[in-house]
Image (tube, grey):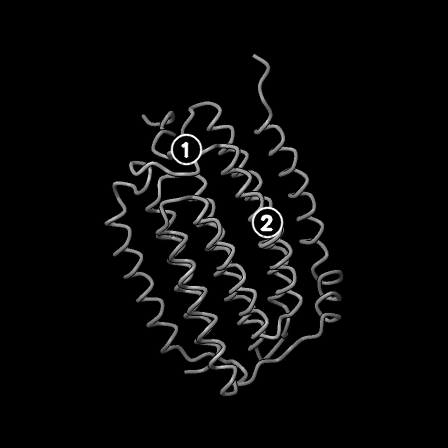
Amino acid sequence: MTEFNQLSFLIISAFTIASALCVVLFKNLIYSALSMIGSFLGVAGIYILLHAELVAAAQVLIYVGAISVLVIFAIMLTGHRTGDINVFFHKQAWIAAPVCAVAAAALIAVMATAEFNSSSNSQNPSDENIATMLFNEYSFPFELVSLVLLVAVIGAVLLAKKEKN
Amino acid sequence: MSPLQQYLILAVILFFIGAWGVLARRNIIMVIMCVELMFNAINVALVAFSNYSTTGAGRGEVFVFVIFALAAAEAAIGLAIAIAMYRLKQNLSVDDLDELRG
């Protein structure tokens, strides 16, 4: 990792973490959704730093393009643009924060001290390699995912449909 | 600290911000958004492992594409449930979903 990459990693990850925190902390759902888009874009930047340009493009298309729009549509349809203050935090929020902090600290300590059998410099597999793997070695999961998507589409239509009576 | 570890620590932080949101917020749409954040953290870890692995570079990226599709399906179903719930209860608080409570 060169000096420049280190700097851009720090900037992008700070941006990503800050907007992820904003998602949790904003009272207004629309603001949360907008900072979620910021966080998704930051993660796309991380993918580009990792030389995974194909994944970054898919992230922008699927997360920033599709899922965010879906979330914003749901917020608009339910009309909860300004979440009430009493619908803000759970009763267990003040227990959840330290629990998550302790678990995160434990995992970070493990990650920082672990010896990974990793190559020192990032390898960049070509998009061709990834496509070959996806359609040869992993063609069964690929087909299974298409089935899951079909079921999800039918289920979403059935759930969101108005009932007759 | 190696670059791989830096990416993994970023993934851990993102994952637990999402987990905190899932545990702490009461709005069901908010919970879905935080689950998406957790998916993103997992994907960062997978791509990092994939690109710094000594064998089989790029294998993790294949998994990431599968996870993308599953995350999209999850979001579609979750938001459909949110809309159905709003129609039924005029409310989005997860505390109100307690019909199965004994």
- The residue singled out by tag 2 in the image is B70
Are tags 1 and 2 found on a single chain?
yes
The residue at the point 38 percent across, 47 percent down is B22
Quarter containing the N terminus of chain B = bottom left
Q: Answer left or right for B71 relative to A83.
A: right
Name the subunit of mark 1: B
Type of the residue with mark 1 = Leu
Relative vertical location of residue B97 with respect to residue B41 in this rendering, above or below: above
**Tag 2 secondary structure:** helix
Q: B30 and B19: which one is in front?
A: B30
Most extreme residue toward the top is A165
Structural crowding at the residue carrying mark 2, measured as other residues with C-alpha within 10 Å and reported as few (<14), some (14–19) or many (≥20): some
- The residue singled out by tag 1 in the image is B92
The residue at the point 72 percent across, 70 percent down is A127
Type of the residue with mark 2 = Leu
Disc 1 to disc 2, C-alpha distance: 24 Å
**Tag 1 secondary structure:** loop
Q: Quadrant of residue B52?
A: bottom right
Structural crowding at the residue carrying mark 1, measured as other residues with C-alpha within 10 Å and reported as few (<14), some (14–19) or many (≥20): many
User: Earlier along the polypeptide chain: callout 1 or callout 2?
Assistant: 2
Residue A58: give x, y in percent of width and height: 65, 59
Name the subunit of mark 2: B
Quarter containing the C terminus of chain B = top left
Residue A20: give x, y in percent of width and height: 42, 58
Residue A87: give x, y in percent of width and height: 33, 37
The residue at the point 38 percent across, 30 percent down is B97
The residue at the point 54 percent across, 66 percent down is B46
Q: Answer left or right for B96 relative to A49.
A: left
Relative vertical location of residue A122 with respect to residue A81 in this rendering, above or below: below
